[in-house]
């Protein structure tokens, strides 16, 4: 007789997708994209953003306008809190029990 596969509790398709994202390397790339979208929404500087890079809780952003960079530098703490709040509301961002953006570096 063959071995039986243990039954699991039924889960929704959405939960299955999130579980697959968490278990694959795609999950971190997906989360990074969600962080970039939160930056665009919270900062309002999406059109002025040339480059974005996220690693180890640090979001590096290169802007095309030095004047905009100066204005945003004065609001760094507010921007970090806003990005993290936006991600908390985002159902497609999976939480790993830490604030995703701890530091913002504007160039």
Image: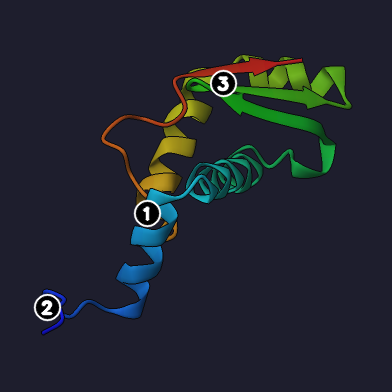
Instruction: In the rendered view, tell whether residue 85 sits above or below residue 107.
Output: below
In this picture the colour scheme is rainbow
Q: Is residue 49 left or right of residue 5?
A: right
Location of residue 61 (image quadrant): top right
SS at mark 3 in the image:
loop
| x and y, in percent, of residue 68 in the image | 78, 25
| x and y, in percent, of residue 7 in the image | 12, 78
Q: Earlier in the sequence, mark 1 or mark 2?
A: 2
Q: Answer yes or no: do the residues labelled 1 and 2 have beta carbons within 8 Å?
A: no
- Quadrant the N terminus occupies: bottom left
Disc 2: CA contacts within 10 A as few (<14), some (14-19) or many (>=20)? few
Q: Is residue 88 left or right of residue 42?
A: left
Residue lying at 87% horizontally and 24% vertically, measured from the top left: 65
SS at mark 1 in the image:
helix
Q: Which mark is residue 75?
A: 3
Location of residue 97 (image quadrant): top left
In front: mark 1 or mark 2? 2
Q: Could you tell me how far apart the alpha carbons at marks 3 and 2 are, in whole angstroms?
A: 51 Å
- Viewer-closest of 33 and 61: 33
Residue receiving disc 1: 89
- Viewer-closest of 11 and 92: 11
Disc 1: CA contacts within 10 A as few (<14), some (14-19) or many (>=20)? few
Q: Which mark is residue 7?
A: 2
Q: Earlier in the sequence, mark 3 or mark 2?
A: 2
Q: Could you tell me how far apart the alpha carbons at marks 3 and 1 are, in whole angstroms?
A: 21 Å
Residue lying at 42% horizontally and 37% vertically, measured from the top left: 84
């Amino acid at each position: 007789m063959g071995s039986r596969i243990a039954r699991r509790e039924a889960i929704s398709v959405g939960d299955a997708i999130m579980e697959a994202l968490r278990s694959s390397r795609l999950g971190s790339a997906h989360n990074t994209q969600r962080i970039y979208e939160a930056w665009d929404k919270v900062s309002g500087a999406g059109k002025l953003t040339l480059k974005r890079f996220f690693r180890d809780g640090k979001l590096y952003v290169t802007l095309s306008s030095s004047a905009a960079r100066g204005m945003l530098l004065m609001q760094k703490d507010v921007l970090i809190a806003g990005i993290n709040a936006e991600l908390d509301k985002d159902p497609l961002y999976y939480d790993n029990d830490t604030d995703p953006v701890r530091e913002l570096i504007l160039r």
